[in-house]
Image (tube, rainbow, N blue to C red):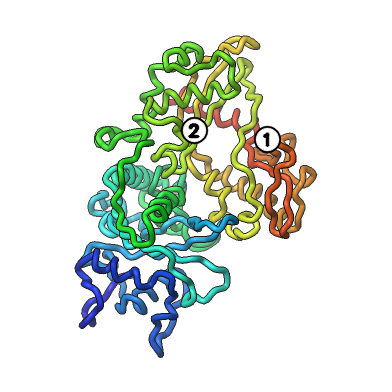
Amino acid sequence: MAVNHNTITSLPYNIKDATSIFEYSKKILGKTLRDFVREGYEPKKGKGSLGQMVENIFFMLETNNYVGADFSEAGMELKCTPLKKSKQDNYLIKERLVCNMINYCEVVDEDFEHSHFYLKCQLMLLLFYLHKNNCDKLDLEFIFSVLWKLPKKDLLIIKHDYEVIIDKIKQGKAHELSEGDTMYLGACRKGQKGESLMKQPNNDINAPRRAFSLKMAYMRTVLEYVVKSGKNAISNIPEVKSELVSTKALLNHSFDDILLNRFKPFLNMPFEKIAKRKNVNIENNPKNKFALIANAIAASAKCANVNRSEEFLKAGLTMKTIRVQASGIIKEAMSFENIDYIEVAECDEWTDSRLYELYSSRFMFVVFREQTAGKEDYLLDDVFFWTMPQKDLDWAEVYWDHIRTNVLVGHISEEYWWKGTDRKKFHVRPKALKATDLAPTPDGKDAKKFCYWFNNEYVREIVENRRKEKLNA
């Protein structure tokens, strides 16, 4: 979608001035397009039609197939993005922000600073609206408006993300792209399974259609800023106290390399010695001592909890510790968050689900390995970033479908869920501190809280595959 300026004679804003356009955009807040539509206007249909109608009806512009930014004279892109309401009546991000389609054969010839993404999306006018099922697009209410300029530090991480995606395409691996490959900028799937595939360079295998997008985790931080700033917000990002790495450091090294280098001096070192070096108190043998040690190394005194740091939150990145016994066995399964039964019931598309976001995100695994059976003489053995392969994501979709089918018919108990003993990579079981902890269900009743889990055998498979990769490197 782009603007045809040739027919413009008089507008209630300066089309060459981003601030003027932003100030005008406030007039749509708390209203719908029906409040502005002119008689005889033919509503648009299909994907992207809401943005086109905002251009036509509210901004009084025609649209054409120009590939530049929507407000090209102002160097600004217009994006309409949906919100939903939580059970506590808070606004939540509904989906990732799709920026532009990826043409595999053309994008390999574009460096970041000349890419369609950079030229279109470094400055965006974001209009947040409240999504409603089966609602005419003309009747959707607009909630927030923000003039969002991607911060310099974010751009450095996004540039690296872009280069990771392009490098994979150049290798003829466009069909293997995953949103978990990157931090903030993802290559998200577009279209349904079975739809036509696209040609890619250096490989005869056609690849699914994908688009550059800002991930849901990133958009949550944008929404959080908008809510705190108020509806009439122009982004002016304050200093973030919980950052893990500095902008200066990112000029010379990738985020991954910076984090991994913090662990290198401690590899093959006993966990007690690391704790002493990093001033981690483990005298009372806390259950989470390995997580505390890993956090102290990764944080490097820059924040209290790396999983709550700016970069981890924006990327949806999670650090997990793994303990491997001397026999190679991993006793503990890996837990995630509790299942939101309402979210599961209301989401009818796997790739829009919370579980898909969790499992397709990146992980940083910190592995401690026991040296002598039963001695608990664990050393820091390995640290690596990991993304779930597509074949396992396909299996996770089956897992999610099974959960959703049971939630929709009210089968929320142990007898219906996948169990660890089923050996299906994933299972469901409680993690609540109290058995009396309950969560709301679609039928208006409360049910026992259950949690998403990786089987311990699956965690072992991940660790063993990593060891094989290192040996073959």
On the picture, is 323 further left or further right than 412? left
Above or below, 449 against 459 in this view is below
Mark 2 nearby-residue class (10 Å; few <14, some 14–19, many ≥20): many
Q: Is residue 206 visible?
A: no
| Residue drawn at the location 42% of the way across and 51% of the way down | 224
Local secondary structure at mark 1: loop
Q: Position of residue 119 (x, y in %)?
A: 25, 57
Mark 1 nearby-residue class (10 Å; few <14, some 14–19, many ≥20): few
Q: Amino acid at mark 2?
A: Met
Q: Amino acid at mark 1?
A: Leu
| Residue drawn at the location 42% of the way across and 55% of the way down | 227
Q: Is residue 303 visible?
A: yes
The mark nearer the N terminus, 2 or 1, is 2
Q: Quadrant of the C terminus?
A: top left
Q: Position of residue 351 (x, y in %)?
A: 54, 54
Local secondary structure at mark 2: strand
| Residue drawn at the location 60% of the way across and 56% of the way down | 87
| Residue drawn at the location 49% of the way across and 62% of the way down | 191
Mark 2 and mark 1: Cα distance apart in space: 22 Å
On the picture, is 240 further left or further right than 355? left
Q: Position of residue 283 (x, y in %)?
A: 55, 13
**Label drawn at residue 319:** 2
**Label drawn at residue 433:** 1
